[in-house]
Image (spheres, helix red, strand yellow):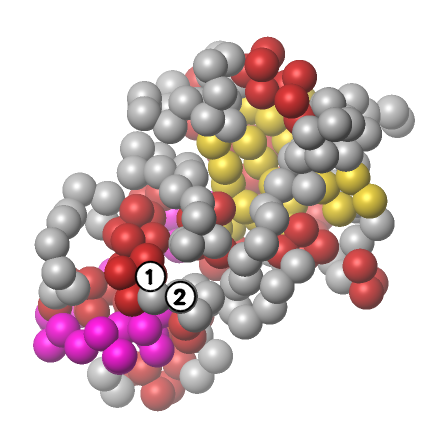
Amino acid sequence: MTLPSPNFGERRGGLRPELIVIHYTAMRSCAEARARLCDPVAEVSAHWLIAEDGRTEQMVDEAARAWHAGAGAWRGQGDVNSRSIGIELANTGDVPFPEPQMAALEALLPGIMARWSIGPEGVIAHSDMAPDRKADPGPRFDWRRLALQGLAVWPEAGPQLPPDPQVFAALAQAFGYPDVPPSQLLQAFRLRFRPRHDGPLDGADMAMVAALAALYGDDGDQWRAC
């Protein structure tokens, strides 16, 4: 099967998809985004593109390495392109994601997750793996809606914990976030889990990140004691 984007290569080092990275296109229309994803000069692509009305198009074979993630890391490993499937949602970044588009995403994700044995903890934001340079899919994207269907994760936080930037950073990195300055780390975390909250690190942030680290971190028993 010939797919429309020429912008792909082989996954490096025998890597297989273990992540699904959600993006928005940040362009005025789906047609404009599609043209860019298929332009060999642009050297960008994704495996899937979902229009505002829910139309879903595969751009690159899932077995290939699409060029969607760029520089960044998750769970201490870089080359996210070789370890992921990229999904672009046609959205400028400053408007809600339409219901048909969300429904189409919810229909697409289970198949990808089953084909590549990716758990809900492996469905992440572009801003999660590149907090120093990316904000998509942004504060309007409903991560909790996906989590309620087993298509992403959401922390069931316990009692609030004393704010401690060093502990917060350690917990966030145990969950998967890269090592970036504290302000960028907190911003990325809140984009996904507390999009309407502002201000300095607080006890609710601490409780949520501790819950995530306990469930999905490299040493969950350590963080359950927090």
> Is 38 drawn above or below residue 113 in the view shown?
above
- Residue 209 locus on image (x, y percent): 28, 67
- Residue 109 locus on image (x, y percent): 56, 39
Asked if one can make out residue 22 in the rendered structure from this viewpoint, the answer is yes
Dot 1 amino acid type: Leu
Label 2 to label 1, Cα distance in Å? 6 Å
Query: The N terminus appears in which quarter of the rendering?
Result: top right
Q: Is 33 left or right of 44, judged from the image as shown?
A: left
Dot 2 amino acid type: Val
Majority SS type along the magenta span = loop
> Is 134 drawn above or below residue 49 in the view shown?
below
Residue indicated by mark 1: 185
Q: Secondary structure at mark 2?
A: loop
Q: Is 22 left or right of 80, judged from the image as shown?
A: left
Question: Dividing the picture into quarters, in which one does residue 4 lie?
Answer: top right
| Of the image marks 2 and 1, the number of the one nearer the N terminus | 2
- Residue 198 locus on image (x, y percent): 14, 49
Residue 96 numbered mark, or none: none
Q: Which residues are magenta?
A: 147-172
Task: Please give the name of the residue rendered at 66% of the width and 59% of the height, measured from the top-left corner.
Answer: 79
Query: The C terminus appears in which quarter of the rendering?
Result: bottom left
Task: Please give the name of the residue rendered at 71% of the width and 55% of the height, measured from the top-left corner.
Answer: 82
Q: Nearer the viewer, residue 27 or 56?
A: 27
> Is 222 drawn above or below residue 41 in the view shown?
below
CB within 8 Å, label 2 to label 1: yes
Asked if one can make out residue 99 in the rendered structure from this viewpoint, the answer is no
Task: Please give the name of the residue rendered at 72% of the width and 41% of the height, measured from the top-left corner.
Answer: 66
- Residue 24 locus on image (x, y percent): 47, 31
Task: Please give the name of the residue rendered at 27% of the width and 73% of the height, measured from the top-left corner.
Answer: 168
Q: Is 167 left or right of 23, judged from the image as shown?
A: left
Q: Secondary structure at mark 1?
A: helix
